[in-house]
Amino acid sequence: MDNRNDIRDFLASRRARITPEQAGLLPGGGRRRVPGLRREEVAVLAGVSIEWYTRLEKGHIAGVSEDVLEAVARALQLDEAERTYLFDLARAAIKPARTPQRRSRTQIQPRVQWMLDSMTASAAFVANGRLDIVAANSLGRALHSPLFDVPGRQANFARFQFLDHRAPEFYPDWEGAASITVALLRAEAGRYPNDTQLRELVGELSTVSEEFRTRWAAHDVRIHHNGAKSFRHPVVGALDLGYYTLDLPAEEHRGLRLTIYTAEPGSPSEDALTLLASWAATTVDTAAPARERS
């Protein structure tokens, strides 16, 4: 797949956000025609020729050494997720063009579901890079119950975020949650540019949602590790939870991540989570585990 446009837009967007002062350069005289750094300034910071950097920013990244990519990443002050994305784009560029492929159906090992089910005080789920929920424990399904009540459709965070009218109510900080969702999908697209289902999802959301299109065009990327998130659940109300996300072993579950939500002990959110667990235990709709479509 030709990813030169993604490379060009990503590097240009990162360059535009850095001022000469932030880069440790003296501001040039006269009016600047572009926001942020000029290409020649990035080239100086990275220690490469302007011709070489210009070619790189036009998307010709195949064959560029890791040392040069590291230098460019430092010059553009890329964070961990952005640096990883740049290297993913470079790896994809040197591979022979491939026909877009559908990934085979995800097979969750039984011991993963056993592990999830053993977590009775935390909401836990496993998601793939497209943000489909492929497995969850009872409390995880209860916490995300609005995502599961569309018959015949895989529970997916991005579709719910941008296509379901209940999302702004469910996520008090909808703007922030939406930006994170798109940044996670953008990072996944860098890792797996030939994933047909991912491309179809992005195409669907881009067609329907202007909010998604705007965020996708920003080329922001993110790696999920840990943080805090607020919910306004239709059954138990406000929940302020912390979460950790861990990669499952790649040899068995490529691209799958386990996320665990917990509440601070003694907090109102812990009480609400306990109430949600009781509700889940008596609600048939949340009893069946999530299954990924073929």
Image (spheres, helix red, strand yellow):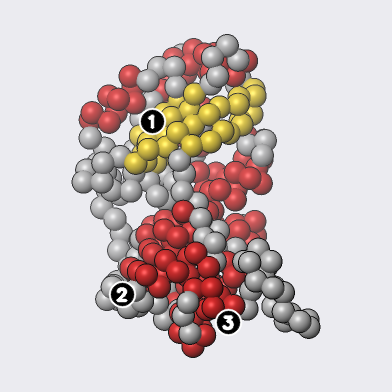
Disc 3 secondary structure class: helix
> Pointer 2: what residue?
94
CA neighbours of label 2 inside 10 A, class few (<14), some (14 to 19), many (20+): some
Question: Residue at the right extreme?
Answer: 30
Is residue 116 among what the camera can see? yes
Depicted 130 relative to depicted 33: above or below: above
Q: Amino acid at mark 2?
A: Ile
> Pointer 1: what residue?
136
C-alpha separation, residue under disc 2 versus residue under disc 3: 25 Å
Residue 150 drawn at (x, y percent): 49, 39
Tell which circle, 2 or 3, labels the residue nearer the N-terminal end: 3
Tell which circle, 1 or 3, labels the residue nearer the N-terminal end: 3
> Pointer 3: what residue?
40
Is residue 145 among what the camera can see? no
Indicate which label's residue lies in the foreground, 2 or 3. Answer: 3
Depicted 195 relative to depicted 56: above or below: above
Residue 278 drawn at (x, y percent): 49, 12
Decide which of 266, 113 is in the foreground and name it: 266
**In which quadrant will I find the N terminus?**
bottom left
Tell which circle, 2 or 1, labels the residue nearer the N-terminal end: 2
In the image, 155: left or right of 15?
Answer: left
